Amino acid sequence: MHNNVSRRALAAAAFSLALTSGASIASAAELTFWSMWNEPEPQAAALRKIMDNYTKAHPETTFKVVWNGRQNQTKLRTALQAGTAVDFMDQDGDQLAGGLQKEGLGLDLTAEIDAATKDSLLPGVLDVYAKDGKYSQMPYVYNTVNFWYNKDMLKEVGGTVPATFDELLSLCEKVKAAGKHALVIESNVAFYNFLYFSHYLSREMGPNGLFKVFEDKSGDGWKDPAVMNALKGTRSLWEKGCIAEDARGFQYPAGQQTIALGDTLGELVGSWLPTELAESAGKDFPWGAFNFPTVTGGVGKATDIEVGLLSFMVLKDSKNAKEAASFLKYVVGEEAQKILAEEASVGVVRKGVAWPGAMAEAYASAEQATALAPFGGGLSVAYPEFASTVLSPEYNKVFLGEITPEQFVDTMVTKTKEFWATQK
Amino acid sequence: MMRPRMILVFLAPAMLLYIALLVVPAFQAFYLSFFKTSGFGDAAQWVGFDNYARLWNDSIFWRSLRNMMLILFVGGIWTFGLAFLFTMLMNSGLRGKKVLRAMIFMPNVIAVVAITTFWSFVFMPRYGMLTSLLKAVGLTGLASTAWTAPENVFFAMMVGLVWISVGFYTILILAGADKIPADMYEAARLEGASNLQIFRMITLPMIWDVILITLVLWSISAIKIVEFPYAFGGPNIDQNLYTPAIYLYIMGFGQRDPVYALGYATAIGVVLFLLTLVTIVLLRFGFKRERVEF
């Protein structure tokens, strides 16, 4: 009898153990994450730490990471075709918007992002890549586009931060008089140079001005006087000596190095510049950042900024979509965002989390932003082929003085008309 | 003697791998070029010859083709001209031939990225080597030239490309020339032939088959060239440096801008394949000569 009872008790215990372990197996999830970082990079180390912290708090969730580097989305394209299961990934928001998101392969995260999470983020961050009010990206790193400059040099030449484009031209005079160069460019990086045009046009027409121009299917949008003002205004930076003539030959990163060398005041570029120049400029370099100034007669504000966000995306077919979405919410939480800012030296998307010292003014720019647009005004997200093969290279020609503004307008009218004629 | 059936058995694994990993994907690529697809698993849309028609009207493709032709012909003339000159000089009884040969070949053992970084520094405005040199000798006007500005950047790249290629082709041509019996050279010298005459009358005809092979190799590498111009132009390469293979990469593999026109990119690949084929056939026929036995 005793034996029978013991056997029954043992069987019951075994059964309940099996149930419990079964239950724990069912809820355990190993999330497969394909990342745009390379393993030795500080950003990868910060993400690794964030994942470890998450696993400590949620032991049922572990991570398997593939560090792919910047070609992550392209590698993922091949992997998805081969049936590889990936739960979530990260990439530049612009690239994701024109890639996986456009193809409808991202999970709709709208329901997962509650009001509290939304309110905790810097203004407009989630909406930059929203489509019809739905979110399929979770931005986690924030880059602003500003004029990045040497504060000490600005003081030495007796200049102040320009609020208008005319003030910027006057500042150039002061810098030139001091025997220095005001601005520098990288002649081979057309999408950096395009920032001058997209900003100027935005200051002329307000946010989305570029879309208004391009989406006129007759091509006549380019004949808007604001376009000519933007072309001539940005060309005047060369004509007035803001940018030295020999900068036409700077190949990335030669141009930006002249800032570190104390030869040039600044450059219009993303907030990654202090990180890229950390070694050559030194950690105490007096970095400052100001927004593209307003232009006479324009309706755009200086606080309308262009951004380059890095985002996560949960794949639509992920078997662990819920767990992955929970993790993404954790990444934009205070603890994880502090780790990213402090250990990876990047700007982050959460309000109140301080950005690394050199980027302090970029944080102010993000906090006070009245409108956000993707890098270069966003045309490269919505119409990547046109932006990449026509608009950006053609603008580079006019900016570098190879063609006239009038020739640019004529080309764009023709090419835009041709583009829309081929769209079915 | 091994029976033919046995040879087939031994060859089968390699042939199967070759067919599965090269021949089948190549045919698939031909097929894919008739579709419009991003490659993200979307439903590919049959467009027939549309990708080819678009290519025909694509000014960027034609510019890339022009650049490729300049590399093939202008770059080829400089590369082979210098390679022949070095071969001639080294076969003229010059002392330290082995050291010179090693020095000429040296750029080929260095990573392309390092070489292009060096050349970018040579041509860099304001602080570059060439600018400093020109300033030092008082040529300030020339020193202010922006060698890597859009109108000059292609030829600046070509200088570096020729520099790196000359060594490789000199070594190949020299290897062929070394097989020519030394008494032929001695006899020619005794007869009073100059170095140029020796090269033209003896070396060149006797290594004709080697030259044909080097020309085929140069043509193939020039037609599908990516790495040198791409590394020279940087990750955000200027259209002035596009070659068809670089354009294929830009259109098919999503760089800074998310362009994923895989069908179109594949059509460029097919055109490149056909171009290579036609060039090789033309070279084989154009340079056909009676083989010199020695």
Image (cartoon, coloured by chain):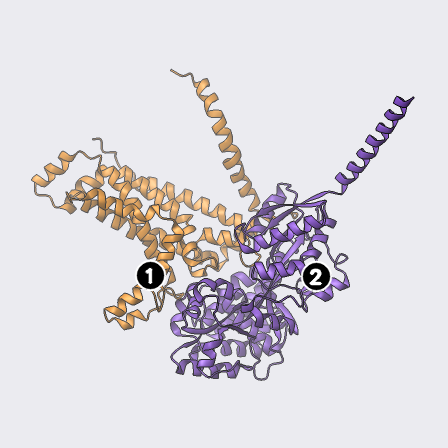
User: Does residue A93 sit above or below B31 in this rendering?
Assistant: below
Q: Residue at x 33, y 46 (%)?
A: B108
Chain whose colour in the figure is orange: B
The chain ID associated with circle 2 is A
- Residue B164 placement, left or right of A159: left
Q: Which residue is mark 1?
A: B122
Spot occupied by residue A77 in the image (x, y as percentages of width and height): 60, 48
Residue density around tag 1, few if under 14, some if 14–19, many if 20 or more, within 10 Å: some
Q: Which mark, residue B251? A: none
* Residue A238 drawn at (x, y percent): 44, 76
What amino acid type should be assigned to the residue bearing mark 2? Answer: Lys
What is the quadrant of residue B232 in the picture? bottom left
Instruction: Give chain A's shade.
Output: purple
Instruction: Mark yes or no: residue B75 visible.
Output: yes
Q: Is residue A10 above or below residue A285?
A: above
Compute the Cα span from label 2 to label 1. 47 Å
Give the quarter of the image for residue B4. Answer: top left
For label 2, the residue is A131
Q: Residue furthest front?
A: A2
Is disc 1 placed on a helix, strand or loop? helix
Classify 10 Å Cα crowding around label 2: few (below 14), some (14-19), many (20 and above). Answer: few
